[in-house]
Amino acid sequence: MKKILLSVLSVGAVLAALCVSGCGTEPRGTEGKISLSDSLHVGTKGAVTVTLKDADLTDTVATVKVISTADQLGITLKLTGKNGVYTGSLAFTTDASSGNAIQVSNNCLVTVTYKDAFPAGTKTQTLFWKAGTMSVKLDNTSYKAIYKPMVITVTDTNIDKPSVTVTVATTSYPNPMLLTCKLLAGSYGVYVDTVYFTASTSLTGKDTVHVKSGDSVFVSYSDALVPVTLAPAAAKWTAIMPMVAPGAPVYTGVKDKIVINVLDSNVSVPSVTVHLKSAKDTAGIDVVLKAVKGSTGSYTAMVGVSLTQSVQGSVIAVLPPNDTMTITYVDPAIAAPILGTALQWQAAPVSISLDSSAYHGTAETMMITAADDHTTADSIVVNVISKLAADTVQITLRLDSTSNFSGKVGFSMGAKTATAVGVKDSDLVTVSYVDNVKNDTPSVSANWYSTQIAALGILGTNATPGATQVPAFNPGFFTWSGTCTVDSAPNFAGNGNTVRITAGTVGWAGFGWTQVDNTGALTGINMTAYDSSSLHVRLKGNASGIKILVENAVHTGQTFIPAANYGYVNDEQWHEIVIPLSAWAATCDLSGVSYFMGATFDPYVAGQYIVIDDLYWTLPAATVTPTAKRLSK
C-alpha cells in the first residue's frame, strides 16, 4: 500500500512541474503565443491590446509580465478569457507604473513576456513607445491694457493629469511666475488658463501678470519626458495712455469741491493716487482716487479748496484771485509721469443787489443781497454811503438760506444810526464791498427821495404817481420827422396797453413828450423850483440803446443821457429808469422846459422797438406851482 501511495504522489508532482507559468492547466503541450495590437504607440492616450493564445490553459485568467526601459521591475498584467484565448489592455504613463499602466519614457522599448509551462519556454513581444505632441500657445501675439486676457493653451498627450504648470515672465519682471493650466473638458492632453494683466504694484488675482508698456511676455512649458526644451510662447503687451483731468476745466470759489478723474485701462485696483499742486502750494498734496463701481479703470475723488492752507489728501490751498493747478499721475505701466489737463481756479466777482432802484421816505428799508463764492465766513460787512449827505454806515450781511449774504439798512434825515444811513432829499445811496481776494470793490446804487407827491404825470397806469396832474402841466406826445411808427403793447401792470415806438428806416429815430398849450403849440414850463426832482420811466424792448434828454424849445446845449447808465437792458424785460433832473441842469434852462422826455435810438437800428410806461416826474413835499409861458417862435 505504501508503495502504491508513493507512486500516486510522484505522478502528481510530475504534473505540477509541467505547469510552471499561467493560470490554467495544460493537459496538452500546445505552444503559447503573444500578440500586440500596436508595434508603435504615441503618447499616453489609448491602450495596446495584449492577446495570449494557449490551448493548454483552462482557467479564466492568465498573466503576462510587462517591463520597459523606464521600469525594469514592470507590472504583471492580467488577461481574461476562455478556451485558451486571453486579452487585456496595456496602458502607458509617464509617472510610476501602477495597475495596468507601465511607466514609459521617450523612445521607450516595452516588452511583454509570457512563461509557457508546457512546453516550457518564454514568449515575448515588444513595442516602441514614443512621446506625443507637446506645445504651448497663446491666443494672440499682442495685447493692450487689461481689457482682454491672455489665454494659454498647453497640449501634451504624454500625460493624463487634471492640470499642468507653466511659467510666465515679462521683460520688466523676469522672475518666473508659476501658473496652473487646467485640463480642458472633453479634450485629452489639452490644458488651458486665462491670464490677466496688470501694471499695478500688487497682484490682484492668482492669474494676474505684472507688465509694463512694451513688455514681451514669455510663457514656457517643459515636460521632463522630453529632453528638448520647448520654445516659449511670446507676445507683446502695450499700455493705453491714461487720461487725467478735472471734472470741469474751471472751478470757482471755495464752496464747491474740485472733482479729479483718472481713466487708466492698465490697472484694476481699488484706488490710484495723483499729486495735485497749485501756485500757492507748490509742494502739493497726494489725493487718493477710488474706483468707480461698474466702470473698470475709472477712478474719482473730490478735493476741497482753501485760501489759507492745504490739508494732505483732501484740501488744496489756492492763490486768489486766480490759480492754476496741475495734476500728475504715475501709471506703473508708463515710463514717465502723466501730466493731466491744467485745472483753473478763480474767485468770481462779488455781486451786490438791492430790492429796488429807488426808495422813498424814512419808513422804507433797503434790502441788500450779496453773493461771495470765495469766503466760508457766515457774514460780511458792506459800506452804505449817501452822496448828498456824505454819510457812511457799515452793515453786516449774514448768510441766509440761499447761501447768499443779506441784510437791511434804513434811512435817516438826521444823524445816522447803526442801522440807518443819513440822507438828503433826492440822494444817491451806494452800497459797496471791499473784496480783498479779487482786489475789487463792487458796488450798486439806488435813488432815495423824501416824502413826495405826484407831479408832472405824463404816461402810466392808475397805479403810478403820474395819475395826479399839476396846474399848467399839459404834455403832448410827438415823433420827430416821422422817424418812428407808434402802436400799442401790454403795459407794465398787465391790465391794459401802453405805447410802443418802432424805429423807422430814415437813418435815425426820435420821439418824446413836450409841454403844449391848448392849441397844441409847443410851449414851456418853469422847472427851476424842481431841481431836486427826478424822471421816472419804465422801458422794455430790444433797442440796442436809448438816450434821453430834457431841454427847452430852442435845443440849446442838448445833453443825451444813456438809459443803460441807469439800468436799461435790451433783453425785452421791464426796467425802471430813474434819472435826477440834475443830470441835465448844466445844459438845460429850467425856466422853460419844453421836452420832459425826448428820446432817440442810439445806436440806431431800423425795426428795433421800445415800450414805454409809467413816465412821470417826482416833486419834493414842498411844492411850487409851475407857471407856463408861451415860447416865441
Image (cartoon, rainbow, N blue to C red):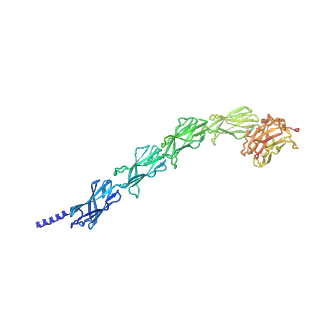
The residue closer to the viewer here, 426 or 52, is 52
Report which quarter residue 600 is drawn in: top right
Placement of 428 over or under 211, stated as above or below: above
Q: Position of residue 399 (x, y in %)?
A: 63, 39
The image shows a total of numbered marks equal to 0
When asked about the image quadrant of residue 34, the answer is: bottom left
Taking 238 as reference, is 75 left or right? left
Residue 363: x and y in percent read 73, 38
Q: Position of residue 475 (x, y in %)?
A: 83, 42
Q: Residue at x 13, y 65 (%)?
A: 6
Looking at the rendered image, the quarter that the C terminus falls into is top right
The residue shown at (56%, 37%) is: 278
Q: Quadrant of residue 114?
A: bottom left
Q: Would residue 401 be found to the left or right of residue 480 on screen?
A: left
Residue 433 rendering spot, x and y as whole percentages:
66, 35
Q: Is residue 238 visible?
A: yes
Horizontal placement of 113 versus 459: left or right?
left
511 vs 445, left or right, is right
* Image quadrant containing the N terminus: bottom left
549 and 482: which one is in front? 482
